[in-house]
Every structure is written in structure tokens, then in C-alpha cells.
Image (spheres, rainbow, N blue to C red):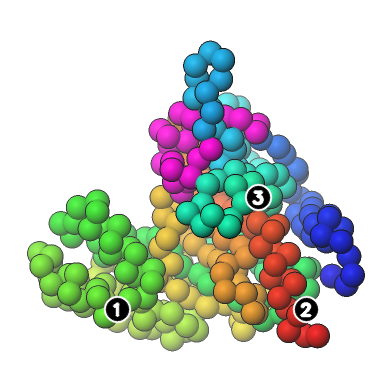
Amino acid sequence: MIPNLTEDEKFEQVTSVLSKRFSTHGFHRVRTPAFERYDLYSKVTSSVNRKEMVKIVDPAGDVLVLRPDVTIPITQELSHSETKLTSERRFYYIQEVFRRSSDPTEKIERTQSGIEYFCESSPEVDAETIVLALQTMKDLKFQDIKVEIGHTAFFQEMIAKLPLTELQLDQLKALIQAKNSVEIAPFLKNVDADPDMKYAIMQIPHLYGKPEDVLRRAKEISTAFRMEETLSYVGEVCRRLSAQGFEEQIVIDFGLINRMDYYSGILFQGYVGHFGKPVLMGGRYDRLGYEFGADLPAIGFACEIESLLKASDNQKLLKG
């Protein structure tokens, strides 16, 4: 980015770069309504916490929310015209989302940009989408780019037969996401499960690193045929990324399970140097369309413009 720009100019520059990259790859810009019925989000399996939604009551007494998400309304809109995907559809957006945060310094309104790629699941398509995410971060001149890749099925297969309450499952997810291997063993001590299964779960936080090494170690603790299928799928995605010159930018993290509510396959998040949180997050959500009576497999990712600007400013400060 060019130095000495105003914040508004930086903002416009970033959105212009994103628009150019997405449209170059055949994505068409769309917008969703600023106000939606609360039922759209409260009755749909979603990654949006209901407590974070900004609600209002209209004159008719209906509860509305300011747009907290873009994937859900785009999927709903497509379901009105297609009950089954007959050809791929590519959409991108740049618009505000509204969510309350537990951090009082965080703004409720943020500008989000992303893509929604409606297509059948395959390693080729998933790799193509991750490449687009990597190219987008390179377009923005970021240094030390990394993309962490996980898969929902790996964890789900492990815990499928565990007698866990919803609260216990949330606690286990939090421990794994925090890579808190010290507390996972005591947590599982009173869970009625096979010792090999408990051992495998305790290894999840350590399944992080270079693809070849992580896939080998993950295969050693695999407890079901579907887990082996998942490892093979992830391995093929990573091979395709390596073949396109991104071997040094990819990392596998099977502890990446924080956004599993409507995701059903590959998960990924992008990091850049000197910024401690993801600047980009995405994954496959093949089952979301079922919530609207349609079969609409898809993959996508999103980033917040404000986070991209902060990350860019951090890198400039350290350079200069």
C-alpha cells in the first residue's frame, strides 16, 4: 500500500484490491439487506452467536436484526431460485456487518468482504479457493503469509460416540482450540470411552505443523475409516497447493474447530506477520442450504477490512 494516505483512502484502496481480485476470478458482486428477520438467524444452524446480534422491533412488532452475517442470506436467496445446484455460482460482497462484542473497545459495525462459491466439494475446488485467499493477501502486500487448514470431520468422528453433554462438548472444544493439552486429560478422565480414543483426542492440539508430518501423525491415531478418508482429502488439497508454489505458506491444524456450526468440511484461516489473529477465515458449508430446503454445496471465506488495515499498519511500523 502507498504510505501517507488518509484512513478513508486506505479503506478505499483495500476494497478496490479485493474487488479486482474477486471479479478477476469470475465472482459477481451482490448485496444483502441491512435488516433481516431475527428468525432467519435464530432458527438456522449458524456460526453467529445470538447474543451478539443487534436486535430492533419494527412498528408491526416483528423482531429484526441488523445484518450479522452474509453467508446465510446469500444462501437463502439462492435457495429461492434453485432447490438443487445445477451449475456453479460465484458471488462476492463488501458490506457492513453488525455484531456486539464482549470487548467494549470493539465497534459494533465492521466492514466485511468475502466470497461465496457454490459448487460441488472436491480437493481441486477447495485448493482453488485457498489459493484465491493466498493471492488476495499477497495483493495486499502482506509479509509472512500463512494459511492454517483443518477439517471438521476429523474431530467429529472422534467425538461421535463419546457420551458428552452439550456443555461438556463446548468445554472440550475450547480446550482443544486453546491447545490446552494439560487440562484435556483430566477432563476426559471421567468420560466413558475407550482409552485409545481418549489418547487420540489428547493428541489433537499437537496435530499442527507441516502437512506431511501432521498427516503422518494423524494417521497413526486414526480410529475410523472416515477419518482416513478425511486425511486423504486434506492431503490432496495440500499437494495441489504445493504444486502451485504455496508449500511454505500452508500449515495443517486439526485443532481448528472454533467455527464448526455450519461448516462441514475444509476449514482454513489466514495469518500475516506481526498480527496475532486471523485476517481471513473460511471453510466449506455443504449443508447450510438444507436449512432452506435446497441442496447448495459451497465454500467461502471472509475478512474484515478494519483488521486488514490494522495488520498492514503493524507491518509498516515494524519496517520503518
Direction from residue 244 to residue 179 in the image, left or right: left
Quadrant containing the N terminus in the rendered view = bottom right
Residue depicted at 87% across the width and 58% down the height? 9
Residue 132 position by quadrant:
bottom right
* Of callouts 3 and 2, the N-terminal one: 3
User: Disc count in the image?
Assistant: 3
Q: In 3D space, how far apart are the residues under numbered discs 3 and 2 (Cα atoms)?
A: 23 Å
Which of the two marks, 2 or 1, is nearer to us in this view? 2
Percent coordinates x, y for residue 176 in the rendering:
34, 70
Circle 1 residues within 10 Å: few <14, some 14–19, many ≥20: some
Is 36 inside the magenta-drawn segment? yes
Question: What is the span of residues highlighted in magenta in the rendered image?
Answer: 33-54
Label 2, label 1: how far apart the Cα atoms are: 36 Å
Residue 73 seen by the camera: no
What whole-number distance in Å separates the C-alpha atoms at marks 3 and 1?
A: 34 Å
Indicate the position of residue 87 as horizontal and vertical percent values: 63, 41
Q: Which mark is residue 268?
A: none
Residue drawn at the location 70% of the way across and 44% of the way down:
95
What type is the residue that disc 3 sits on? Arg
Percent coordinates x, y for residue 263 in the rendering = 45, 52
Left or right of residue 182, residue 85 in this image: right
Q: Which mark is residue 110?
A: 3
Query: Could you say which disc has been placed on residue 316 in the image?
Result: 2
Secondary structure at badge 3 equals strand
Q: Earlier in the sequence, mark 2 or mark 1?
A: 1
As displayed, is residue 83 above or below residue 144?
Answer: above
Residue wearing tag 1: 181
Q: In the image, what residue type sits under mark 2?
A: Lys
Residue 32 image offset from top left, x and y in percent: 66, 35
Q: How many neighbours does mark 3 have within 10 angstroms: few (below 14), some (14-19), or many (20 or more)?
A: some
Q: Earlier in the sequence, mark 3 or mark 1?
A: 3
